Amino acid sequence: MKVTVDAGNSRIKARAWSGAVDAAGVPRPVGGLVTGGELPQILSAVDRWLRGLEEPFEAALISVGPSAARAELERLLRERAARLVQRPDPGLEVRCSVPERVGVDRLWAARGAVARAGRSAVVLDAGTALTVDAVVCDGEGGDAFLGGAIAPGPELGARALATWAARLPLVQPRPGVAALGRDTEEAILAGVGIGFRGSAAVLARAVAEEAGLLDAPLFLTGGARGFLAGSGDFHGPVEECEDLVHLGLLDRAFGPPTP
């Protein structure tokens, strides 16, 4: 069994893999954990989950969180796993002006898209922020991350309006609202929700066009992907993939799983 762990600033997402695949042949996790909070609570939740796995496992960890939290997670995984792959390399040439400043979550989502499609792709990661990135694949391991765009997500947009615009209330964005808001709250919901769809679609097409990837597949991941899935706003078909980062980590740390 393989375990992949993606540690963010305030949330940890883990997946367990045993070689199962879906109807399209894509690796399918057999278990998972999403937890957040203070570090002691996170470590306790991860430890309980790891202890509940029925098979010995190897683990791989990526982290964008504080170094102290990463060190504690590494210690816990070393204690519980038969082997820990620490800080694996996504295997992408980063063609950006300051490569070391590109977020590792963007690189691993791009790697997951390449692992899934076997070809160049455009990746939309919808969360607190929206990232739209281009990754090229030559089929012989010469894969490259070209860069992309970063924009506010729906919740961040709502918080910004409540903070910086006079007398606008804070709302909780949700998908599927009407564009024609009948009061201030509904108008904000329309702006941050439907406006998010519009910005995502325009950015996806513009990034794809500038990268020469208009015919490349589009992948959608992230916690706010429900605002975009099935919208029909994009220039091509969109494949929704909740565990895109984990697929990239699984592929690079362990290779394709086998039953």
Image (cartoon, rainbow, N blue to C red):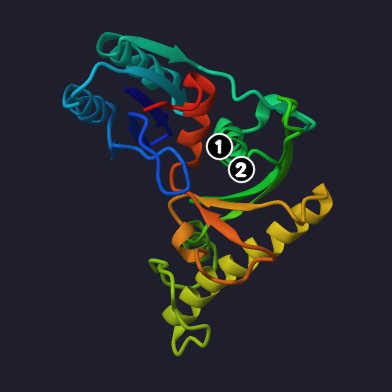
Picture quarter containing residue 99? top right
Q: Where is residue 14 drawn, in percent x and y?
A: 34, 33
* Amino acid type shown at disc 2: Ala
Q: Is residue 122 above or below residue 33?
A: below
Left or right? Give the position of 191 relative to 1.
right
State the residue at coordinates (75%, 55%): 215
Quadrant into which the N terminus falls: top left
State the residue at coordinates (29%, 27%): 39
Picture quarter containing residue 106? top right
Q: Which residue is mark 2?
A: 117
Classify mark 1: helix, strand or loop.
helix
Mark closer to the observer (2, 1): 2
* Amino acid type shown at disc 1: Gly
Q: Which residue is mark 1?
A: 112
Q: Is residue 250 in view? A: yes
Left or right? Give the position of 114 relative to 247.
right
Q: Where is residue 92 drawn, in percent x and y?
A: 68, 27
Classify mark 2: helix, strand or loop.
helix
Whole-number angstrom distance, CA of label 2 to CA of label 1: 8 Å
Label whose residue precedes the other's in the sequence (2 or 1)? 1
Residue 170 vs residue 32, the one in the foreground? 32
Q: Residues within 10 Å of mark 2 (few under 14, many from 20)?
A: some
Q: Is residue 1 above or below residue 188?
A: above
Left or right? Give the position of 158 relative to 69.
right
Residue 131 vs residue 231, the one in the foreground? 231
